[in-house]
Image (cartoon, helix red, strand yellow):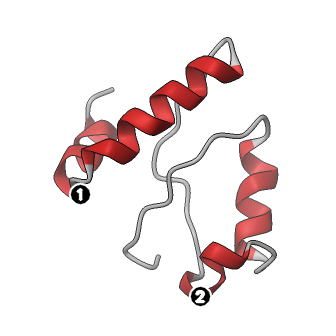
């Protein structure tokens, strides 16, 4: 694991992770490998985007890490 967090939304989390780990995503290519840390599922893309923006706004590693242990 690279000790960094990537926050994003997708319809297919396994395919998205595969793309990141194969180096096909320029913004994450320099920090391989990536592991799935946490995921949430939403009924709509709009709701997923709202949540993504909320998580990115936190800018706190500890706040993000609390998600992993909250379920």
Question: For the residues marked 2 and 1, what is the alpha-carbon distance in whole angstroms?
Answer: 20 Å
- In the displayed structure, 54 sits above or below 17; it is above
- In the displayed structure, 58 sits above or below 20; it is above
**Residue 36 position by quadrant:** bottom right
Precedes in sequence: disc 2 or disc 1: 2
Please tell me how many numbered marks the rendered image carries. Answer: 2
Residue under the point 58% across and 30% down: 49
Residue furthest to the bottom in view is: 30
Side of 21 where 69 appears, left or right: left
Q: Nearer the viewer, residue 28 or 53?
A: 53
Estimate the x, y position of residue 55 in percent, counting from the top left: 37, 40
Estimate the x, y position of residue 3 in percent, counting from the top left: 37, 75
Side of 4 where 61 appears, left or right: left
Q: Secondary structure at mark 2?
A: helix
Residue under the point 71% across and 44% down: 13
Q: Secondary structure at mark 1?
A: helix
Badge 2: residue crowd in 10 Å (few <14, some 14–19, many ≥20)? few
Side of 31 where 9 appears, left or right: right
Q: Nearer the viewer, residue 30 or 21?
A: 30
Side of 29 where 25 appears, left or right: right
- In the displayed structure, 4 sits above or below 7; it is below
Q: Which mark is residue 30?
A: 2
Residue under the point 54% across and 83% down: 31
Badge 1: residue crowd in 10 Å (few <14, some 14–19, many ≥20)? few
Look at mark 1 in the image and give the residue it sits on. 61
Residue under the point 42% across and 62% down: 5
Estimate the x, y position of residue 23 in percent, counting from the top left: 76, 80
**Residue 25 position by quadrant:** bottom right
Q: Which mark is residue 70?
A: none
Give the quarter of the figure containing the C terminus.
Answer: top left
**Residue 45 position by quadrant:** top right
């Amino acid at each position: 694991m690279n000790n960094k967090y990537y926050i994003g939304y997708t319809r297919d989390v396994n395919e998205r992770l595969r793309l990141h780990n194969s180096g096909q995503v320029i913004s994450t290519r320099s920090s391989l490998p990536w592991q799935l840390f946490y995921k949430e599922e939403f009924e709509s893309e709009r709701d997923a985007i709202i949540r993504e923006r909320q998580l990115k706004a936190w800018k706190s590693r500890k706040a993000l890490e609390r998600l992993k242990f909250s379920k």
